[in-house]
Amino acid sequence: KKIFDPHVRFDFFDNIFWVIMVENSCDNKAPPCVSNILIAKSTTSDPSLNPIDWVFKRIDARIKEFHWLDYPGFSFDHEMIYITANILEATNILPPGYTRTPLDKSYLWVLRKSNLKTHAGPISLGQLQTNTPAVRHAGWSSGTY
């Protein structure tokens, strides 16, 4: 597994730090490619290195068998965290006759901050997708858009 593309932001709404990274496992010999979004949230405004001061989550971001996640970005407001990433084709493991589409899509995950406040297990979301940009309105739920 490879972990890469770390991003760190300070959340002025909650006075905490957020960190996201991508975890990919895409064997050169055989599918499936496994992609996860790793999220870490500090519990205070002091980003100490003590793991007890952080909440860690993993989002299963597998979209398609021969694809992997890259180039994540994120932002937040007072209630939600928004994570974007590109889904790229793993061209080195495609079966014969597979139609090539190097950049498949860009995705947006919308998560309620309140769902990320405890050390509970991994987050698993339904895979919803659209080619239309997402606009969040009051009352929207967490999900993948």
Image (spheres, helix red, strand yellow):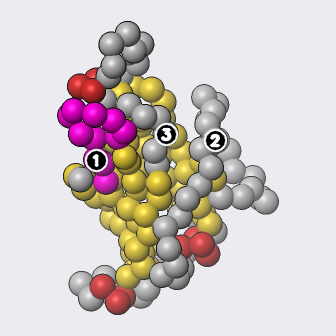
Residue occupying image coordinates x 54% and y 45%: 108
Q: Can residue 9 be seen from the camera position used here?
A: no
Q: Which residues are magenta?
A: 23-33
The answer to whether residue 10 is above or below residue 92 is: below
Image quarter in which the C terminus is found: top right
Viewer-nearest of discs 2 and 1 = 1
Residue at the spot of label 1:
25
Going from N to C along the chain, the mark reached first, 2 or 3, is 3
Mark 2 residue type: Leu
Mark 1 residue type: Ser
Residue at the spot of label 3:
63
Q: Residue furthest top?
A: 97
Element at label 2:
loop
The x and y percentages for residue 24 are 30, 48
117 vs 25, left or right, is right
Q: Can residue 32 be seen from the camera position used here?
A: yes
Task: State the separation of the CA atoms marked 2 and 1.
Answer: 22 Å
The answer to whether residue 119 is above or below residue 87 is: below
Residue at the spot of label 2:
128
Task: State the separation of the CA atoms marked 2 and 3.
Answer: 10 Å
Q: Nearer the viewer, residue 106 or 100?
A: 100
How many neighbours does mark 1 have within 10 angstroms: few (below 14), some (14-19), or many (20 or more)? some
